[in-house]
């Protein structure tokens, strides 16, 4: 029984760590993809591709917040807790992942506003 618990403690947080990086990675990818697409958007005078990239990134980031929230609700750990058991660690990582995704979401919304307000051909 002890071996199974130790294996679960090792495996479960590894997948949860992805919640911490999904938001920032999506933010960086959306920014870089739009950086590449700006030249095409300027020459075609169409910003629909830029809008699409940002909307997709925003939707995926909201999805990561929802996943983190579901994990947090599933564990039902009361806060604050100083115990070092598995549900407390899972809850802590899920909350950190939600915070990282929400911060990234705010950055993406600011980038989306800039795409809407400014012309891609401005220098």
Image (tube, rainbow, N blue to C red):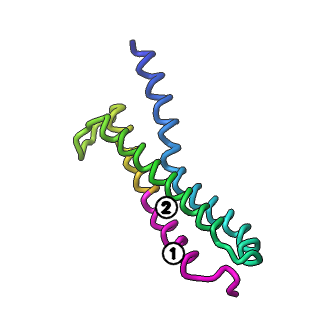
Q: Secondary structure at mark 2?
A: helix
Above or below, comparing residue 104 to residue 8 in the picture: below
Q: Is residue 39 left or right of residue 91?
A: right
Residue under the point 72% across and 68% down:
37
Q: Residue furthest bottom?
A: 123
Q: Is residue 99 left or right of residue 30?
A: left
Task: Classify mark 2: residues with Cα within 10 Å, few (<14), some (14-19) or many (20+).
Answer: many
Task: Classify mark 1: residues with Cα within 10 Å, few (<14), some (14-19) or many (20+).
Answer: few
Q: Earlier in the sequence, mark 1 or mark 2?
A: 2
SS majority, magenta: helix
Q: Is residue 97 left or right of residue 49?
A: left
Residue bearing the label numbered 2: 104
Disc 1 versus disc 2: nearer the observer: 1
The magenta stretch spans which residues? Answer: 102-123
Please state which of residues 76 and 6 is positioned toward the viewer in this rendering.
Answer: 76
Quarter of the image for residue 114 reads: bottom right
Residue bearing the label numbered 1: 113
Q: Give the x, y percent position of residue 57.
A: 55, 57
């Amino acid at each position: 029984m002890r071996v199974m618990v130790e294996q679960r403690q090792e495996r479960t947080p590894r997948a949860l760590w992805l919640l911490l990086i999904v938001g920032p990675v999506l933010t960086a990818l959306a920014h870089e993809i739009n950086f590449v697409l700006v030249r095409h958007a300027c020459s075609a005078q169409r910003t629909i591709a830029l809008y699409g990239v940002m909307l997709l990134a925003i939707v995926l980031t909201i999805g990561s917040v929802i996943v983190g929230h579901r994990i947090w609700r599933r564990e039902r750990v009361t806060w604050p807790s100083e115990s070092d058991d598995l549900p407390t660690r899972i809850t802590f990582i899920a909350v950190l992942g939600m915070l990282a995704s929400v911060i990234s979401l705010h950055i993406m919304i600011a980038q989306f506003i800039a795409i809407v307000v400014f012309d891609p051909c401005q220098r």
